[in-house]
Image: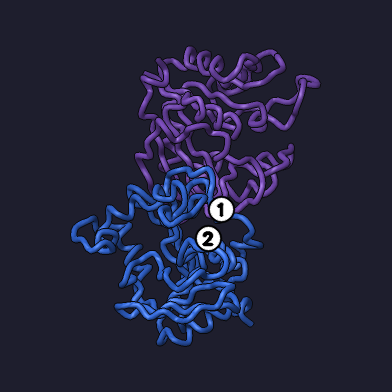
Chain colours: A blue, B purple
Amino acid sequence: MASVRINSLMVSLDGYAAGSDQSASAPMGIGGEKLSAWLWETEFGQSMIGKFGGSAGVDNEWLRRGEANIGATVMGRNMFGPIRGDWPDDSWLGWWGDEPPYHHPVFVLTHFPRADIVMAGGTTFHFVTDGLEDALAKATEVAGGKDVRISGGVATVREALRKQLADELHICIVPVLLGAGEQLWENLGAWPEGYLCDKLQSSDSVAHLHFTRSAKDEATS
Amino acid sequence: MASVRINSLMVSLDGYAAGSDQSASAPMGIGGEKLSAWLWETEFGQSMIGKFGGSAGVDNEWLRRGEANIGATVMGRNMFGPIRGDWPDDSWLGWWGDEPPYHHPVFVLTHFPRADIVMAGGTTFHFVTDGLEDALAKATEVAGGKDVRISGGVATVREALRKQLADELHICIVPVLLGAGEQLWENLGAWPEGYLCDKLQSSDSVAHLHFTRSAKDEATS
């Protein structure tokens, strides 16, 4: 049975998973780069930018695990780009250049319809206007038996947790304060009810916490 | 050189180090007991209530370390008791019964003078009306070369961090949400500027993060 997974979600001590004022030049908002500094130290992070080297170890293993066995991705509009409102044209193709690192179907939540975008390397962006549940159903259908990842942003993650749509959540607590931005720990309803924190592990830089939905049958029946 | 230490400060994912509405029957506020559930599983926690048994291991080691080499304690008024405003009489002697677990001088911050209280087992409560710096100076003086611990509550901890009065901070991040209470991560000024997160370690229950003041000379000169 395919799982819906939220992996490698970086969050500051004060609960922000992105800074404020996201823009084309600040994809993670103001100060958001503090959340990901550790990522670039890892082998996984280096490979994301086409380089070799970087550290193996705890952080790298969690990052690799987060990418493994994913057949489709669901993301919120802001994760795809900084444009708000209707699409002015078809020029914005995501943050990731010609060949995005997904290599599978990606479902982007939006209120504004747009034609599919077929990118190099196997990534196709589909635009879904009927909400998160619909996007997850479509993603599951094309994931070929693999898992579906919700990659963000924060509002989408919160919705998935509040509605108990995610089977697992892996957060990376980074020992910094952002002071403002996208707050993860609000508007979560009864969460973590229905979830169990079943794994904690720390590197020298980050504390990894993993939650598994413990009440899947009740939540989906 | 004696250090000023904040140890074993428990904080929820959403940043609360105590619940709301502290009272005589809820010393850590509503829901605050969620923060300390893991503590009672340890050898250290069991010994606090006069019992044997409990787990050794990571959590226990951090808790033991937090108590080691402490010659005096400073605490805020709310850490001493639920009474607000002037002392109605001298009947409140703290949360801890006849023999508090300190066994050294304890300096309680208050706006309302009160005579020292000599308890069994070596604990004396002193009431300090001239603020945190004065309490730390007095505590350092009587600590006999050992360290001084700031044991809480949250407002006192925040003041110590904001003013860079603490040499070290050890927090225990507990994977629960409180939703309301005493928020640790606000009104901290430029913190963690001047501090380095030099140790992260997790047990199955708790993520321990340790910060050391890296700029002591600048801060105190």
Q: Can the viewer see residue A194 in this picture?
A: yes
Tell which subunit mark 1 falls on.
A
**Mark 2 near mark 1, Cβ–Cβ under 8 Å?**
yes
Q: Quadrant of the C terminus of chain B?
A: top left
Tell which subunit mark 2 falls on.
A
> Residue A15, how many percent across, how many down?
53, 50
For label 1, the residue is A183
For label 2, the residue is A154
Which amino acid type is marked by label 2? Val
Q: Earlier in the sequence, mark 2 or mark 1?
A: 2
Q: Nearer the viewer, residue B188 or B16?
A: B188
Residue at image point 62% right, 27% down: B76
> In the rendered image of this protein, does residue A89 appear above or below residue A49?
below
> In the rendered image of this protein, does residue A16 appear above or below residue A113?
above
> In the rendered image of this protein, does residue B119 appear above or below residue B10?
above
Mark 2 on the same chain as mark 1: yes
